[in-house]
Image: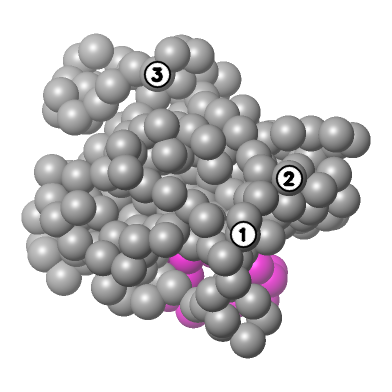
C-alpha cells in the first residue's frame, strides 16, 4: 500500500488478531460501503502500485483473510480515493503481550473525506471489534507518532511539547489507547479504562462525541481537522492528554 500523503487522513484501528476463518476484513469492507453510499471498494493495489480490478472481490478478500491477511484495496472512484488494508502485529510488540490486527484506511483530506471520516472510523472500528482507533490528518499524525519513546535511552524532547508516551509493547493492556488523534474511537472497555466520560470534565468533548451501537464512542477533538500549526488545536490536544493520563501508558511508571 502506498505511503500516506499529507493531503490524506490516516485512519488506524487496533483490533484483536485474526483467528481461523475470521471474516472481519470482508465485513469491514462491506461496512465502509454501507456507511458511505456510493463508495465501492473494487480494486487491489499491487506491489508495484498498479490498480487491479477485482471481479469477485468478496471471494478474493475472504480467501486472503483465511490466511490472516488483508490485501491493499482501493475505491473505484478516482474523485474519492479511499484505500483500506490490514496486517497482524505479533504479541511481543503489542500491549499486554496480546497479538493484534491493524486496519489501515486512507481518505482524502477534502470536504468529502472530512465529512466521511467519523462515520467510516466508527464503521471500521465496530465491525473490526476494535479496542480503539483514530483518524488524523497525516501532517498531525506524524508528530503524534513521534511522541512514542521506543528505547530507554531515548531522551530527546517530543515534538511541540507533547507528552512522552510508551511504546505499545510496554503498555499493560490493549484497551488503553496508545495515543490521541483528531477523531478517536474508544470501545466501551477503552472508555471505561481511561475514565471517559466524566460529565463535568468532558463536557466540551461530549459536545463533539457520539455513542456507537456497541457502547463505544467516536470523539472529535476539534471541529476542523487537527492542525498542530494552529495554537488552539495544539492546546486542545495537550489538554486532552492531561485529562486522560492513562492514554499512552503515562499513569504507570
Q: Mark 1 points at which residue?
A: 54
Label 2 sits on residue:
59
Q: Which residue is drawn at 25% across and 26% down?
A: 209
Along the polypeptide, which appears first: circle 1 or circle 2? 1
Q: What element carries label 3?
A: loop
Q: Position of residue 20 (x, y in %)?
A: 89, 35
Classify 10 Å Cα crowding around label 1: few (below 14), some (14-19), many (20 and above): some
Q: Which of marks 2 and 3 is nearer the N terminus?
A: 2
Whether label 2 touches label 3, CB < 8 Å? no
Of 75 and 209, nearer the camera is 75
Identify the residue at the far bottom of this view.
Answer: 48
Q: Is residue 152 visible?
A: yes
Q: Mark 3 points at which residue?
A: 212
| Magenta-colored span | 144-157
150 within the magenta span = yes
How many angstroms separate mark 1 from mark 2 (CA)?
9 Å
Q: In this view, does 136 lie to the left or right of 232?
A: right
Residue 231: x %, y % from top left: 11, 62
Viewer-nearest of discs 2 and 3? 2
Q: What element carries label 1?
A: loop
Q: In this view, does 192 lie above or below 77?
A: above
Quadrant that contains the N terminus: bottom right
Tell me if residue 181 can be seen: no
Amino acid at each position: 500500500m502506498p505511503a500516506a500523503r499529507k493531503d490524506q487522513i490516516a485512519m488506524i484501528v487496533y483490533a484483536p488478531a485474526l483467528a481461523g476463518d475470521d471474516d472481519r476484513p470482508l465485513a469491514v469492507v462491506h461496512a465502509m460501503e454501507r456507511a458511505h453510499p456510493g463508495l465501492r471498494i473494487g480494486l487491489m493495489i499491487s506491489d508495484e502500485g498498479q490498480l487491479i480490478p477485482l471481479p469477485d472481490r468478496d471471494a478474493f478478500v475472504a480467501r486472503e483473510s483465511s490466511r490472516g491477511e488483508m490485501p491493499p484495496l482501493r475505491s473505484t472512484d478516482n474523485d474519492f480515493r479511499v484505500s483500506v488494508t490490514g496486517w497482524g502485529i505479533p504479541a511481543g510488540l503489542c500491549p499486554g503481550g496480546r497479538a493484534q490486527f491493524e486496519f489501515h484506511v486512507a481518505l482524502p483530506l477534502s470536504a468529502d473525506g472530512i465529512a466521511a471520516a467519523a462515520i467510516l472510523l466508527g464503521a471500521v472500528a465496530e465491525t473490526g471489534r476494535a479496542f480503539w482507533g483514530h483518524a488524523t490528518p497525516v501532517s498531525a499524525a506524524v508528530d503524534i507518532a513521534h511522541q512514542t519513546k521506543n528505547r530507554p535511552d531515548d531522551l530527546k524532547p517530543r515534538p511541540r511539547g507533547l507528552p512522552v508516551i510508551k511504546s505499545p509493547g510496554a503498555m499493560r493492556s490493549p484497551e488503553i489507547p496508545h495515543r490521541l488523534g483528531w477523531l478517536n474511537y474508544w470501545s466501551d472497555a477503552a472508555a471505561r479504562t481511561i475514565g471517559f466520560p466524566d460529565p463535568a470534565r468532558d463536557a466540551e468533548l461530549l459536545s463533539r462525541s457520539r455513542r456507537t451501537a456497541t457502547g463505544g464512542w467516536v470523539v472529535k477533538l476539534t471541529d476542523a481537522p487537527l492542525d498542530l500549526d494552529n495554537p488552539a488545536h495544539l492546546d486542545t490536544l495537550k489538554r486532552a492528554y492531561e485529562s486522560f493520563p492513562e492514554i499512552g501508558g503515562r499513569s504507570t511508571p
